[in-house]
Image (cartoon, rainbow, N blue to C red):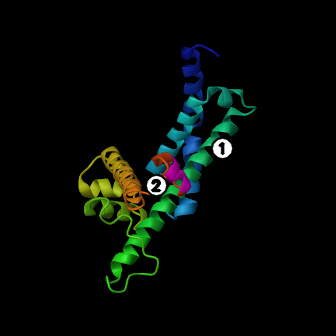
Amino acid sequence: MEKNTDLEEIYGHYFQTYYTKLWRLAQRILTRHTGRSDPDRAAEAVQEAFLVAWEKPKDFLGSVSPVGWLVNALKNVLRNMLREDQRWHARLRQVQDALDHTAVHPAPGADLELEGLIPPEELDLLKRLYLNGETYQEIADQLGLKKSTLAMRVKKSKEDFQKKFWESETFFDPDVEQPGPAEHLSNRGGSKR
């Protein structure tokens, strides 16, 4: 493998040359699947694709077409992003449906997995993102936050929920051997993020 400085130059070349094209591709894919433009999300996906390439230099630089490899990495990142969005949308829709019914007549199959596991303001924030379709930038502007601060807050809320949810399942079913958090999320179709 080449020296680190050589690798940095090679990666720098790919980043400078293909970032904008990959960003446009990410924008098209996200807009097609979500029905709205979110340039920041597209940028996040492209940066993550380059991070994947950085972490796998032999795969990336050893491929027949490094650009094609980057495109496939980007598509995988976007696929994972959209799947995570769908999971959170489904969870939040379920919670909202259950909360809309009275306690006497709960919604069929209602699962209040989020209620009580994260603070109401964090639940509201997730609903705005995943149910109302607001972008990070729109919410950050309304709350007077930097977008990066909001993104960290959302990530922490989701991680807190996943940890508390796993603990609550362990608490209610102590006789069953429980998987670790990573296995648990994998079994439920979630990711480690």
Q: Are marks 2 and 1 in contact (CB under 8 Å)?
A: no
SS at badge 2: loop
For image coordinates 54% across by 45% down, the residue present is 23
Residue sticking out furthest to the bottom: 105
Query: Which residue is at the front of the view, 160 or 177?
Result: 177
Judged left or right of residue 108, residue 78 is right
Could you say which quadrant of the image residue 50 lies in? top right
61 lies above or below 181: above
Pointer 1 local density, CA inside 10 Å: few below 14, some 14–19, many at least 20: few
Q: Quadrant of the N terminus?
A: top right
Q: How far from the left and from the top, in percent, is residue 27? A: 54, 52
Residue type indicated by callout 2:
Asp
Q: Nearer the viewer, residue 96 or 65?
A: 96
Q: Quadrant of residue 69?
A: top right
135 relative to 144 in the view: left or right: right
Seen in the picture, residue 192 relative to 106 is either above or below; the reply is: above
Total numbered circles: 2
Say the numbered circle drawn on residue 21: none
Q: Over which residues does the magenta segment extend?
A: 183-187
Say which mark, if any, is on residue 38.
Answer: 2
Secondary structure of residue under mark 1: helix
| Residue 165 visible in the displayed image | yes
Q: Measured from the top left, where is residue 140 in percent x and y?
A: 30, 53
**Disc with the residue nearer the chain's start (2 vs 1):** 2
Q: Main secondary structure of the magenta part?
A: helix
Any mark on residue 72, and which?
Answer: 1
Residue displayed at 48% across by 59% down: 85
Q: Residue at x 59, y 49 (%)?
A: 25
Q: Residue at x 30, y 45 (%)?
A: 149
